[in-house]
Amino acid sequence: MMNLTAQTPAPTTPAVIGLTSIEAEERLAELGPNMLPEPEPPSPLRVFLIQFRNPIIYILLLASALSFATGRIEDGLFILVVLLINASIGTYQEYSADRAAAALRRLEQPSARVIRDGVACRIEAKRLVVGDLVLLESGDRIPADLMLVDASDLRCDESLLTGESMPVPKGRTVEGSSDETASSMLRAGSLVTRGRAKGVVTATGTATMLGGIAAELGRASSSQPPLVARLAKFTNALAVFVGLAALVLVVAGFMRGLPLHDLVMMSVGLAVSAVPEGLPIAISVALAVSMRRMAARNVIVRSMPAVEALGSTTIIATDKTGTLTSNVQTVTEIRLPDGTDIALDAHSDLDKCEIRASGLDSDLVRERARRLLRAALLANEGTLARRDDLWVAAGDTVDVALLAAGRKAGLGQEELNDRYPLAARIAYEPEHKYAASFHHGSDRIHVFVKGASEVLIEMSDRMDSAGSVVEIDRASLLAQKEEMAARGLRVLAFAEGEIGASLAGSLGHGHLVDLVFLGLAGLQDPVRPEVPNAMKDCHAAGVEVVMVTGDDPRTAAAIARDAGLSFHAGQVVSGHNIDEAARAGDQRLDEITREARIYARVQPAQKSAIVASLIRNGHIVAVTGDGVNDGPALKKAHVGVAMGLRGTEVAKESADLVVTDDNFASIVAGIAEGRAAYRNIRKVVLMSVATGAAEVLLFMLALPFGLPMPLLPVQLLWLNLVTNGIQDVALAGGRPEGDELAGPPRSPLEPVLDRTMIRRVVQSTVAIGGAAFLAFQWMIAHGYGVPEARNITLLIFVMFENVQTLACSSERRSIFSVDILRNRFLLLSVLAAQTIHISAMYVPWLSGTLGLSPITPLEWGLSMLIAGSLVLVTEVDKFVSRRRRDRSSHA
């Protein structure tokens, strides 16, 4: 848990009269300014050098060094250019680490009203010190952690820190009471939504709760993007393979008595062949293309590996307020005293909708509902007005919600105030739990009251029933209230009455008796309309969803049920349960997170613990959120998803992805794009590894048969970086196939080269490398010179790459059933690769460097026939794989 201890106890006397300027300056010098530290950003050079910390880069650097050492300057430069391009692409991605703390600093109040030297004055918030007496009113952002010394009708919006959707009542409590700390403490970064207060500063800067969150954000993320982890394993295995292959060739060469120069050249050729130089760029292209497509679907990607990480997600830990819900309190139900229930559309246009009642007495029901809402609008201190074709609200969120409900019933606050002139008002006080207003009538004073159900039921002796006033049935009304609360609604009650005009000069609490109870209103932060379908899509895609919220368990469960989240009572746990489990050890906490689906009353540190536990349980975790309290969890997860419209800068800067329309369904669309990106990466890996391994096989077959080196290192570079590179990029940018959400996510343990990929790599390697070797051997045996044999062998490899590219356009579908025109760039890449190679045969300086020359039509025909044999190999494998899947699905 976060340490919330004050920096130093605030003395009693200054807490009442404030500090002197001298005392404040002394404390400022001792404790420092009230601001979060600004970390030094990493230098561009350091970030650039970090890009080279990768095993595949080491192999490429070694190949480049060997090329320079043996005089192959073109080869070495070619490799270095690729490395520089790749490093440049990754460098700009590394500058977001310090922006989360900067966003937190922007949340701080730039100025604050304090008592200094006995006089109220405004100072810069960064100059606040422990012991300062701060004055607050509605609309103020709290500049530091404060202990209340005085409060009047004070409510604070702490949703950015706690996730609690409702403003929290604050006030001094009786010493020793259970809620003393919570109700008398004001936290930096929260907002005063109502009332006035005085408070003594108990903590500033990093010692505040906001500062604790900033410190958590400053820690390095413990999770690693799945793509990074998979590629690390792949490149490590590739390095071992290259080393062993090189050792075998060198040993075999020594046994044959080859000169050292030839052995070095062979090693360079092998390194160039085995290492897919174009793979880093192709992966960057795949992720960049998906980033652009995600942006078109309202998902902005801030960290490139997060594209694939989202596609790998096995569980989404979603915030409730502002993510699943609209973060706007709304009246969704009116319950009249006789049990008549009226539903209000939570998302209706205020200009068009109306209350709709069914039954024979629908006009009467609507009139009774308007009577209840009249009381709600008159005993109301908020405002709702239309400005520039938009509704603009001010005041307590509950008051605004009631005004909106009245508008749906055709009632306007201004018209009612004109009809019932205000005589007196009793403002809401937490200890009273109600608000009331008194209005002049023709010969009477009208009384309208709203507040807690239990209080108003006791104030009333009658109730409205079917349009008539009857004796109140308190038991029935309390049962109705409990039933509504059990569904997660916040329940308010309304009543009205009349008193004699002679009492107009002494209106007060004592006149709130013998009222007519009008009914109940249920408020909630409604679920976004698109969320239930998005939940279904997640279920179909095998992605689990859990809710993590600061709200009450009963409210959380009701919202989760409306959102379409499947769970049972035993899967609802609280922050208290999380704390107990954490104290018992990681194993106990991991047992809870394996089963839980709703986490309620959760604090920021607990949310981070939940995410860490889900990761330990083997999940690829995506966390959604919009508040300051979500920042640490967003950073700890494999992929953090912030809401763009209502999200704080802290959440956005801590996240890897930002959903610009706050639409949970956009996350599901992002998952589909992420899966498509990984499919494309697999296609590039299959293409690159298979052709590279085929080149290695060609070398390893040529050596024991006493054949010369089949291809020169520069020819291998031409294959891997030019002709192959074009096709890699085309595969990387391929369109989604449309069935990305049809199955479960990949296992987090699945390597880049799984069994299917290994089988196909082996098959392609044998087919390509074996056929090229047989062709090369035949040409040497039938009188072809070594340069001519290499020329045709290189052409055969280019054709094989073209066929392999078309075969890789889909892992499952036949090459004859794939709509090639859906990825025109892929078809153009095949034509471009072949055209470039043919052109190189006729460009003097290029043909001389590469050792190319034109060939006869017969040689063209034979080369095409040899390369076409790969179609048979890949089609047979796909056909067998489809049959196996069909049999397993019917089993």
Image (spheres, rainbow, N blue to C red):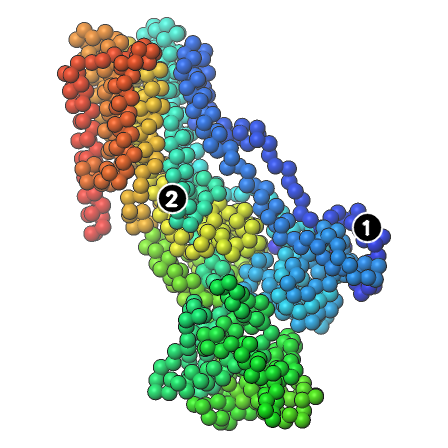
Q: Identify the residue at image location x=54%, y=70%.
A: 384
- Mark 2 lies on a secondary structure that is helix
Type of amino acid at the residue the image marks with label 2: Arg
- Residue hosting label 2: 293
Circle 2 or circle 1, nearest the eye: 2
Where residue 55 sits in the image (x, y, percent)? 45, 28
Question: Marks 2/1: CA distance?
Answer: 54 Å
Q: In this view, does 98 lie to the left or right of 644?
A: right
* Residue 25 tag number: 1
Where residue 293 sits in the image (x, y, percent)? 38, 44
Q: In this orientation, does residue 35 appear?
A: yes
Image quadrant containing the N terminus: bottom right
Query: Of callouts 2 and 1, which one flags the residue occurring earlier in the amino acid sequence?
Result: 1
Q: Nearer the viewer, residue 867 or 135?
A: 135
Against 89, residue 71 (above or below) is: above
Where residue 512 sits in the image (x, y, percent)? 62, 87
Q: In this orientation, does residue 754 appear?
A: no
Q: Identify the residue at image location x=51%, y=94%.
A: 471
Q: In this view, does 424 lie to the left or right of 404?
A: right
Against 457, residue 292 (above or below) is: above
Q: Nearer the viewer, residue 31 or 152?
A: 152
Type of amino acid at the residue the image marks with label 1: Glu
Where residue 588 sits in the image (x, y, percent)? 50, 55
Classify mark 2: residues with Cα within 10 Å, few (<14), some (14-19) or many (20+). some
